[in-house]
Image: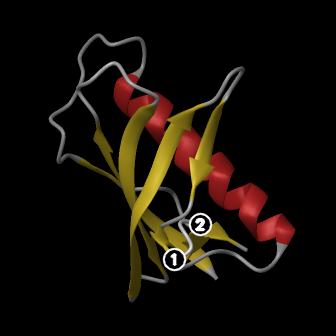
Amino acid sequence: MEITKVEIRPMRSEGNLKAFCSVVFDDVFIVHSVKVIQGKENLFVAMPSQETKSGEFRDTAHPIDNDFRLKLEEVILQRYMEVVGNGKNRPSALEEIPTEDVTI
């Protein structure tokens, strides 16, 4: 499976949520609402989730294979850093950042 495009939509607030992302696979399938979040020490990727009746959050889409999850996180965080950099020359919130083809 190839990750063929990652769209980064940086958040303008100063909270822990740094960006929403959409990820396209094989140019035919897209997953929206992937999040880049600032943890205590590092940025991490959170998959789309929905709150259950008991108040817990459950992922609605996620990688099954750990190797694929690590590669997906790597590609998303790399694109996030390219978009936001150090805050200079920040692109518009809707700019698409295509990835190179990443075969998994």
Label 1's element?
A: loop
Of the numbered discs in the image, which one, if any, rests on residue 87? none
Q: CA distance from mark 1 to mark 2?
A: 5 Å
Residue 92 % position (x, y): 15, 35
Quadrant that contains the N terminus? bottom right
Up-down relation of residue 47 to residue 44 (above or below): below
Asked whether, in this view, residue 72 is left or right of residue 98, the answer is right
Residue 21 % position (x, y): 38, 55
Quadrant that contains the C terminus? bottom right
Q: Amino acid at mark 2?
A: Glu
Up-down relation of residue 100 to residue 28 (above or below): above
In the picture of the structure, the residue carrying the numbered disc 2 is 56
How packed mark 2 is, by other alpha carbons closer than 10 Å (few <14, some 14-19, many 20 or more), is: few
Task: Farthest residue to the right: give it.
Answer: 66
How packed mark 1 is, by other alpha carbons closer than 10 Å (few <14, some 14-19, many 20 or more), is: few
Q: What residue lies at 24% left-to-right and 22% top-to-bottom?
A: 90
Label 2's element?
A: loop
Task: Farthest residue to the front: give it.
Answer: 54
Of the numbered discs in the image, which one, if any, rests on residue 52? 1
Asked whether, in this view, residue 49 is left or right of residue 93, the answer is right
Q: Amino acid at mark 1?
A: Thr
Q: What residue lies at 72% left-to-right and 58% top-to-bottom?
A: 71
Residue 83 % position (x, y): 36, 32
Q: Nearer the viewer, residue 74 or 45?
A: 45
Disc 1 vs disc 2: Cβ atoms closer than 8 Å? yes
